[in-house]
Image (cartoon, rainbow, N blue to C red):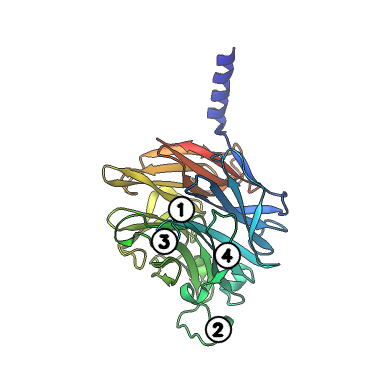
Amino acid sequence: MRYAGMVLIFIFCFLTGKSQRKTVPVFISGTEGHQSYRIPAILKLLNDNLLAFCEGRVNGAGDFGDINIVMKRSIDGGKTWSPLQTIVDADSLQAGNPAPVVDLDDPAYPQGRIFLFYNTGNNHEGEVRKGKGLREVWYKTSTDNGQSWGNAVNITLEVHRPKQSQINPAYNFSEDWRSFANTPGHAMQFQHGKYKGKIFVAANHSTGGPQKQFTDYKAFGYYTDDHGKTFHFGRDVNIPGSNESMAAELGNNKLMMNSRNQKGDVRARIVSISSDGGATWDTSYFDNNLIDPVNQGSILNIGTRKQNNIIAFCNAANEKRRDNLTLRISYDEGKTWKKNILIDKSVDEAKDFTAYSDLVKLSKKQLGVLYERNGYREIVFTIIKWK
């Protein structure tokens, strides 16, 4: 009877598409001082602790308002999570787009130093695109595995080109960048080759006034070659409407950035390849194998096989709505995606169910996925055995 019952459960799950993968709630809307939690990012530290970050939205689910950056810790591989810790509180304004990365290459910090990049804003995104507001770029660091954090450092004028009158009359930029956002998800650091130690933060900005189909947006990235002493930004991706992005290291000193197509005319991800650490782009193209409903996606280098880097990619693999969260594995640095693993799917195909996500490598065979679930009511963690 027990075996028969398990078979029936399996058949039910197969027919309905309902995932039986174990998920652990991490951030639950309406608890711990925030009405909504969105925009997940996750790190694994040298001591094997996991740090989960997101936006804690105090009064509701909207993208603008009283929004904090919050964090939880797991010391047991994601089975349980600590109480919430607030890392950035911008008073009644917006702090968001957490993009964490561990600098493992700075000799001054042999145990690693965490960088948490984030943005602040004083108006809705639509108003900032009209020139009525400002988005700024900041970071904080931690040298004790996230137990405490240093003072915030404002790098806006190094990586952003806002109208000079809004921030400092001494600067006179020829550009007119307006909206600005990191990632969402983790930032990255080169682990090998010519650019070893370089930290790269995928980002996007709008230029000038709002344009139809969001063609005022372009994806790009900013980086530091000296562990945060100075920052620089690279060129835009040459596809109008390229937006939320994340990057991963390839072989031969190359970088792959994967971006959202805000135009929505092509329901697929935009891929850009750089040979100079993200300063310029060799090529940009749509990967039609990575279908997307105009949403965020996560990408991660998870190892090598036959001298090729293995790349993992996760998104809501659906052209119409945010659902069908799927992990894809490429053994040839993104040329093809041979393995596809369904992570989670709704039984109600009329609503968003799974949306933003971030990936973390747990071991040679396991990945962790931190993702938005159940119509943005929760951010959960699950473990995928991909190998």
Query: Where, by quadrant of the figure, is residue 230 drawn?
Result: bottom left
**Residue at the outermost top position:** 1
Disc 4 from disc 3: Cα separation: 17 Å
Residue type at tag 3: Asp
Query: Which amino acid, mark 1?
Result: Arg
Q: Nearer the viewer, residue 299 or 303?
A: 303
Mark 1–mark 2 contact, CB under 8 Å? no
Q: Is residue 12 above or below residue 171?
A: above
Spatial CA span between label 4 and label 2: 25 Å
Say which of marks 1 and 2 sits in front. Answer: 2
Residue that label 1 marks: 267
Report which residue position mark 4 lands on: 150
Res 258 visible: no
Mark 2 residue type: Asn
Residue 106: assigned label: 3
**Image position of 163 with respect to 102: above or below:** below
Q: Position of residue 340 (x, y in %)?
A: 42, 39
Whichever of callouts 4 and 2 sits on the residue coming sooner in the sequence is 4
Residue at 52% x, 74% y is 156
